[in-house]
Image (cartoon, helix red, strand yellow):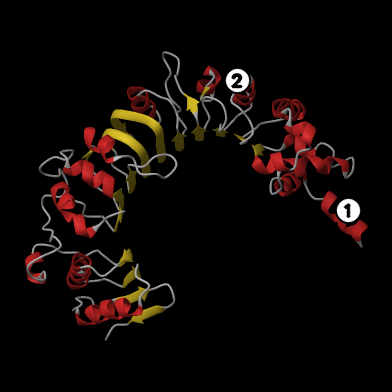
Amino acid sequence: MSGSTSDMISNLPCNVLEKILMCLSLHAAVRTSVLSKKWRHIWTTLPQLVFDNTFYKECTRATRNNLMMTIYQVLLQHHGPILKFTVSLTALESCPQIDQLIHFVSKNGIQELTLHFHKGGPYKLSSSLCSCRGITCLDLVSCVFKPPPGFKGFSRLLCLKLDKVVIAGDTLSSLISCCPLLERLTIESGSTSFGYLEIVALNLRFAQFVGLFSSVCFKSTPHLAKLSIHLLSSFGNLVSEKRVTSKPNMLTGTFPVIELLELDYYHLKAMAAGGIPNRHPNTLTHLKILKLHLICLGKVDEISMACPGVTVVLDPIPEPLEVQDWSDISLNQLREVEIHRVSGTRPELDFIKVILAKSRILERLVIKLESKEVYEEWRILKELIRFKRLSPDAEITLKSRDEVLRLGQSF
């Protein structure tokens, strides 16, 4: 039975066998060469080569001690196009020999290139990279990107990810504008601080910025639907308030079709320090999801300064906020809301009260509690029961550590 099964697999078309091998790690794919004569060379035409930590774990000790030679040997035995090439090995130090790898794949139809370096200094990218005209996805970690004079960009690039990449701000702006098909952009600055960035990307759908950015101007992004900005370090630690407020972050531009906007407390704090125009140049009529991370509603004075058109109640307040005070606010497109780490402060409850009273088509409100005390949960629950809801279909889900309580369409 096993022999017949083996024959059935071996007799499959070569393109099917290639797809099977692409589901395996590269090391496992190479090992299939010992199965039979037919299998001996199938791996050598695989269109994707991935040298990552999974590959490293499956290597012998001798192979691990000379990773570059191992990669060279694989490339020397390979035939045909290499559409996807990944080097992401924690144990591999950046070194000049990597230039030869980039040169090799640039001559073999590379479309998706991933280069992640975690040891040694940032790798200075070879000029061969700029000759990869057919590249559609470029993912770089800890590299130095300095294109040669006359570089015209990547005409087919759809996705660009840069993490701890050393690049001048004007060079980055120019690179983005020279990629006319670019749809997804992710930039994590690490310890590098960017000054003024101008984004011209007519096809851009998604953009994410993490790190230190003084000013980001979305000059022409008519199709941008999702935007995320976090003033965080590359390891998830908050940058110091001194560094944030010393160079206020100004987010400018028009967002005619933006659906998701994600900001954090430090971005709002920088905006409050003077990094936002007195009047926002456009209305967010298509906005469906607004995510605010690390927001303390007890410090809403800074949010108020960042958003001068919004009335914000401070804690402590002399009187509870009345919904009538928000008569000029409408949330007619809001369907789902999630609020995390709610402790039941007056500003938090007032905020929830307004959400319920002003959201005509609200379907789902999820509240995740911070407190582990039962009496605190019941106190918050009693407050929620008293709040009026504009939407008859709104369901409130109250989540604590131990249980989930749903308050349906009628209390």
Q: Which amino acid does the dot numbered 1 rest on?
A: Asp
Mark number for residue 7? 1
Residue toward you, 222 or 371: 371
State the image quarter where residue 356 is shown. Answer: bottom left
Left/right placement of residue 92 relative to residue 249 reads: right
Mark number for residue 196? none
Would residue 65 be seen by someone viewing this image from the given angle? yes
Residue toward you, 101 or 215: 215
Q: Position of residue 268 (x, y in %)?
A: 23, 47
User: Closer to the camera: disc 1 or disc 2?
Assistant: 2
Q: Which amino acid does the dot numbered 2 rest on?
A: Asp
Badge 1 vs badge 2, beta-carbon distance below 8 Å: no
Disc 2 residue crowd, few under 14, some 14–19, many 20+, Cα 10 Å: some
Q: Secondary structure at mark 2?
A: helix
Q: Secondary structure at mark 1?
A: helix
Q: Position of residue 270 (x, y in %)?
A: 22, 41
Which residue position holds label 2? 99
Residue at the (40%, 37%) spot, across then down: 187
Residue toward you, 242 or 128: 242
Residue at the (65%, 41%) spot, across then down: 53
